Image: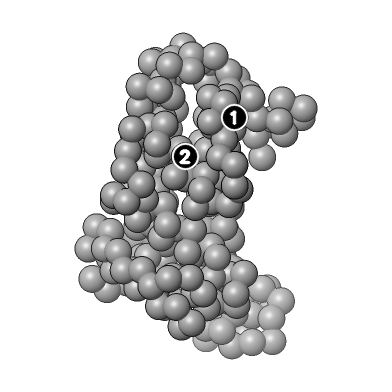
Amino acid sequence: MGNYANLNQVLDDLQSLNQTTENIRQKIVSLTQVAYNSQDARHVALEGIQCDIGACGNWIRCLMSLKHLSKEKFGDDWDQEYRKLIGTGLSTGQAEDLMLDYLRNTLTTKIHFKIESLFANILKDLNAFPNHKGFWNISNAMLDQAGMSRTGREKDVLTVLASLRNSFHANGMHNNDDLSVEIDGVTFEFRKGKQVKCASWLHIVAAIRANISVLESILLSKVVLGLNHEIRDDFAWETGSST
């Protein structure tokens, strides 16, 4: 499966991801009676994911609109004027690649942080936080509580997003064991000691979509639904903010 044909397709999928996340929030309200606008860790994390996805989409749309308006206003000189408005000495293609790479990498990192924080908060509430920190151990403990396998597809999906995030710490390299996972026809190949080459928009969106699906299964599992009270998120409880 190839990459997106254009950024409009990326925006459509980002919007779909946000709606899927919203649907999960509504299910949580319905099934637990925990208020939508509460500082419950589930709503805090999911709202944060919505904000990250929305902000990423907004910046992409701004860049697209600026380019379109430059072409309309400046005609044949649009490229030079467009680069002036961006404030870059790079070529248009280089500047756009740089900005879009930043958005893609930032979106991946921030969403993964929120997933890890959410799992930690739920496990603390369940008095089931593992003895050893780190996402591998936290995700294993969370899967255990939700009645899911530590070696099944859910673990693979969670590990894919974690591996993408970890590659940023290693300047684009994968330093853990080899991993090969297919998600919705998109192949993720991680080879120890090799450069990560599965972080296109298509890969990132597929990984985020699959992780949101795993989140839904975990949050709607019997044990987690049984937490029909506000799960504490320290930052949100102290500041009244989810971001």
Q: In which quarter of the image is the C terminus?
A: top right
On screen, residue 67 above or below 89:
above
Query: Which dot marks residue 141?
Result: 2
Q: Position of residue 149 (x, y in %)?
A: 31, 43
Image: 18 above or below 79: above
Q: State the SS at label 2.
A: helix
Instruction: Give the mark nearest the N terminus, 2 or 1.
Output: 1
In the rendered image, residue 157, in percent from the top left (x then y), is placed at 36, 54
- Residue 107 placement: quadrant: bottom right
Residue at 52% across, 78% down: 173
Q: Hey, what amino acid is under mark 1?
A: Lys
Q: Is residue 12 visible?
A: no
Instruction: Residue 89: tell me if it is visible.
Output: yes
Q: Percent x, y for residue 50?
A: 51, 41
Of helix, strand and loop, which one carries label 1?
helix
Q: What number is the disc on residue 124?
A: 1
Q: Residues within 10 Å of mark 1 (few under 14, many from 20)?
A: some
- Going by the numbered disc 2, the residue's amino acid type is Ala
Q: Residue furthest front?
A: 131
Q: Quadrant of residue 82?
A: bottom right
